[in-house]
Image (spheres, rainbow, N blue to C red):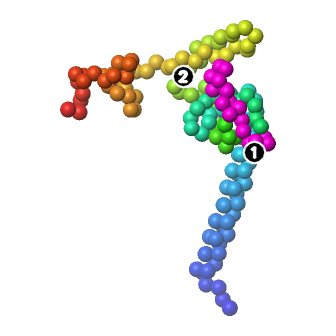
Amino acid sequence: MQSSPTTIIMLVLALGLVFLMFRNSRKRKQQQETMTTKMVPGARVMLSFGLYGTIVSVNDEKVTADVEIAPGTVVTVHRQTLSRVVDDNGDDAATAVVGTTATGDEEPRPVIAPVETTGEPEFGERLGSDTTGVVDPDAKRDDR
């Protein structure tokens, strides 16, 4: 029985897809293992909902982690919410490290201040509002 060229091409494509699926699965597993080894107490992390903090402790039995989100404020989250480890090089564009501060026996902490902007409103920012959040009804708007 002879094989048609179409059948051979379909078999090669199917084998190629299976190979790519296994390779991607292996890559994801390796990345997950690397991420798990980086998530140790003291590591700065970003949670899946955008909150930054420092890991205080990890409980493998309960699959939870205690994350300090502010000095003295520790929250307990599921380990799956730890989405990535933040590098020390400060890749966060919204803040800049100004200096360090130390109080008492604690180790010095970085002092973070907002980066100056160009004065243009950011996406979603209301024009004509003051610091209380009340919008001035007499403020000029471009869309009228």
Q: Quadrant of the C terminus?
A: top left
Q: Who is closer to the viewer here, 1 or 70? A: 70
**Identity, as a three-letter code, of the amino acid under mark 1:** Glu
The Cα–Cα distance between marks 1 and 2, rounded to whole angstroms, is 30 Å
Instruction: Give the number of marks.
Output: 2
**Identity, as a three-letter code, of the amino acid under mark 2:** Thr
Looking at marks 1 and 2 on the same chain, the residue that comes earlier in the sequence is marked by 1
Few, some or many residues within 10 Å of mark 2 (<14, 14–19, 20+): some
> Residue 69 placed where, x, y %?
63, 26
Residue 59 vs 127, above or below: the answer is: below
Q: Which residue is mark 1?
A: 33
Res. 96 mark: none
> Residue 37 placed where, x, y %?
77, 38
Give the residue furthest to the bottom: 1
- On screen, residue 28 versus residue 143, left or right, reads right
Res. 95 mark: 2
User: Mark 1 touching mark 2, by CB under 8 A?
Assistant: no
Magenta region: 60-76
Q: Quadrant of residue 68?
A: top right
